């Protein structure tokens, strides 16, 4: 079954991604029950989020990932006082001493490699591969952490692996959110450039800049050549946190980028991108979105756990992104859904903010 290049998939592959990420549900549940004893802590009284995370000795990011997943599973709820409490489901089945308690059964997975790895990640608040004796973090580039994206073989392998999802999603993004009248698109951390290429194929007048690490851009150039748009793409090597953001663009795309970073880096990157835009320009955040209440959806909560282990980020809610956009001088627009739980949240720059 061969497709013409850059067309939307005939069958929605979302269910495959949900199954693939399902192991994180097992790992988070077993970690919560057998290692962190979450439901024993909230058995007799509800707790504020910060009080619970202090009892768990977890930093804010891992605590958010764990609590969001448990809320999405229907095991924790926020009560009228804004405190976390066990649901009836958790009280009856995950509280030691209850007649119908199954926490011992869940604990059978407590010493499995995946659960132990998740527990270690939650406690350390560091991505896998970030220690000196490991092979390097796969999906992030940051000073002080060796990145697999800096080595030719691993960069090619990881970039092409990520291209599988992009090939499915990019045509839907380009179709659902056309760029009529846009002259230049800046694709920050653009990887394979597939999202840019999908728009280039729909808009012959459009040009694109794909901004990423040098080894990654070698793959992007090859893919642009395959699709006959290489003459309309600039492949710009650089560091999106350190190098000047290219100006003269109408639209800047952050596709599946911000979820790799913690909140401070997200604010910084959004601010840098908005500053480089003209008034009226658009910043497009293409990503997955948690509910604004941080209580699901469950598939995105489990993806957030995957992001947590592999990067310095997690999944964020649309409201978190809206706050950061407003801080940077943008008015958020409505989310346009794409595919595989993703959507695009546009921010329209209204004014240049004063420096300082």
Image: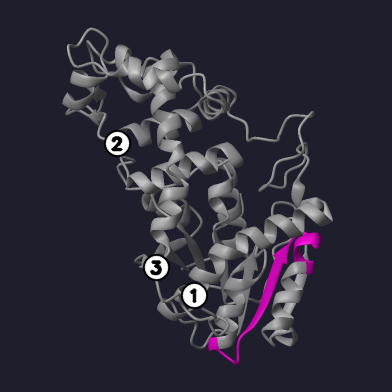
Percent position of residue 240, x then y: 70, 56
Q: Is residue 276 visible?
A: yes
Q: Residue 61: which numbered mark, if any?
A: none
Q: How many angstroms separate mark 3 from mark 1 (CA)?
A: 34 Å
Magenta run includes residue 211:
yes
Q: Residue 12: which numbered mark, if any?
A: 3
- N-terminal of the pair, mark 2 or mark 3, is 3
Q: Give the residue number, with chain letter if any, for mark 1.
A: 280
Q: Could you classify mark 1 by the number of other residues whose Cα lies within 10 Å: few (under 14), some (14-19), or many (20 or more)?
A: some
- Nearer the camera: disc 2 or disc 3: 3
Percent position of residue 165, x then y: 54, 63
Q: Nearer the viewer, residue 273 or 255?
A: 255
Q: Nearer the viewer, residue 310 or 190?
A: 310
Magenta range: 202-218
Residue placed at 58% from the left, 28% from the top?
A: 125
Q: Nearer the viewer, residue 275 or 88?
A: 88
92 shown above or below 304: above
Percent position of residue 32, x then y: 40, 22
- N-terminal of the pair, mark 1 or mark 2, is 2
When asked about the image quadrant of residue 207, the answer is bottom right
Residue placed at 77% from the left, 38% from the top?
A: 135
């Amino acid at each position: 079954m061969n497709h013409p290049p850059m067309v939307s998939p005939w069958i929605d592959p979302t269910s495959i991604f949900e199954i693939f990420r399902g192991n994180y549900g097992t790992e988070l549940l077993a970690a919560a029950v057998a290692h962190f004893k979450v439901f024993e802590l909230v058995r007799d009284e509800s707790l504020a989020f910060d009080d619970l995370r202090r009892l768990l000795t977890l930093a804010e990011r891992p605590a958010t990932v764990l609590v969001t997943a448990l809320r999405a599973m229907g095991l924790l709820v926020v009560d009228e006082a804004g405190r976390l409490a066990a649901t009836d489901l958790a009280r009856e089945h995950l509280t030691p001493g209850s007649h119908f308690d199954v926490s011992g059964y869940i604990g059978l997975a407590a010493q499995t490699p995946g659960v132990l790895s998740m527990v270690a990640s939650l406690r350390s608040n560091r991505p896998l591969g970030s220690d000196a004796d490991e092979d390097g973090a796969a999906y992030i580039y940051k000073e002080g952490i060796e990145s697999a994206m800096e080595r030719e073989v691993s960069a090619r392998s990881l970039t092409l692996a990520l291209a599988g999802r992009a090939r499915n999603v990019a045509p839907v993004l380009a179709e659902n959110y056309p760029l009529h009248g846009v002259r230049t698109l800046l694709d920050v951390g653009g990887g394979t450039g597939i999202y840019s290429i999908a728009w280039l194929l729909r808009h012959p007048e459009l040009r694109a800049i794909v901004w990423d690490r040098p080894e990654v851009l070698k793959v992007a150039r090859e893919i642009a050549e395959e699709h006959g748009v290489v003459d309309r793409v600039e492949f710009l090597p650089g560091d999106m946190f350190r190098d000047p953001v290219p100006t003269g663009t109408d639209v800047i795309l952050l596709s599946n980028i911000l979820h790799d970073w913690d909140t401070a880096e997200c604010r910084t990157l959004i601010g840098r991108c908005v500053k480089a835009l003209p008034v009226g320009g658009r910043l497009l955040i293409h990503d997955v979105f948690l509910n604004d209440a941080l209580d699901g959806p469950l598939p995105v909560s489990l993806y957030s756990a995957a992001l947590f282990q592999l990067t310095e980020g997690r999944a964020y809610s649309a409201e978190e992104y809206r706050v950061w956009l407003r801080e940077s001088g943008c008015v958020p627009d409505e989310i346009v859904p794409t595919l595989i739980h993703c959507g695009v949240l546009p921010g329209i720059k209204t004014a240049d903010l004063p420096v300082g």
